[in-house]
Image (cartoon, rainbow, N blue to C red):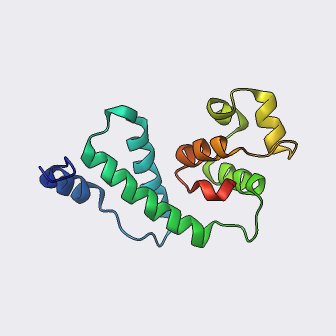
């Protein structure tokens, strides 16, 4: 085991299976996005090796999105709508974050701002940087 409690051999096997690399296509983006979602779904059950892989994959996704998907000078609301459209998400998919349909509707319609707490939760849910929503 390494100093971080991570088994280098296990991590190497995860890397070999996943083959993370700089994203240059929508296909590769989708593949790594699916991998990130699978890892995030494990929640507290992730191993140290899986946590390290998730951190790497999210970083690659954020870099790609910053280059390919970012809207110039987009407001947090516009960014949220854009990312929802790209991922095929509906308003109901955000209920776990905002806790009510009315609140989701207010955010989407620009009647409420996205709080810092919600920005962090959205970032984790969508696998992007919280800075997009602040």
Is residue 68 placed above or below 133 in the rendered structure? below
**For residue 78, side relative to residue 47 (left or right):** right
Q: Residue at x 31, y 53 (%)?
A: 52
Q: Is residue 80 above or below residue 99?
A: below
Q: Residue drawn at (25%, 58%), measured in percent from left and top?
A: 15
Q: Residue furthest top?
A: 100
> Is the residue 7 above or below the residue 94 in the image?
below
The answer to whether residue 1 of the structure is visible from this angle is yes
Q: Position of residue 47 (x, y in %)?
A: 26, 40
Residue 92's image quarter? top right
Left-right relation of 42 to 68: left
Name the residue rendered at 57%, 65% in the picture. 65
**Residue at 86% across / 47% down in the picture?**
110
Q: Position of residue 98 (x, y in %)?
A: 69, 33
Residue 16 x, y percent position in the rendering: 22, 59
* Pick the front one: 41 or 98: 98
Q: Quadrant of residue 90?
A: top right
Give 35 or 50, whichever is nearer the viewer. Answer: 50
Q: Quadrant of the C terminus?
A: bottom right
Q: How many marks?
A: 0
Name the side, left or right, on which 67 lies relative to 49.
Answer: right
Query: Does the rendering let one see residue 28?
Result: no
């Amino acid at each position: 085991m390494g100093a971080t409690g991570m088994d280098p051999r296990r991590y190497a096997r995860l890397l070999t299976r996943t083959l993370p690399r700089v994203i240059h296509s929508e296909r590769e983006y989708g593949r790594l996005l699916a991998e990130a979602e699978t890892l995030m779904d494990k929640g507290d059950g992730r191993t140290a090796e899986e946590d390290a892989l998730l951190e790497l994959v999210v970083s690659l996704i954020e870099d790609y999105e910053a280059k390919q998907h970012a809207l110039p000078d987009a407001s947090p609301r516009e960014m949220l709508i854009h990312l929802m459209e790209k991922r095929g998400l509906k308003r109901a998919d955000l209920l776990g974050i905002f806790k009510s349909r009315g609140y989701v509707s207010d955010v989407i319609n620009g009647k409420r701002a996205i709080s810092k707490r919600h920005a962090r939760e959205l970032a984790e849910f969508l696998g992007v940087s919280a800075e997009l929503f602040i």
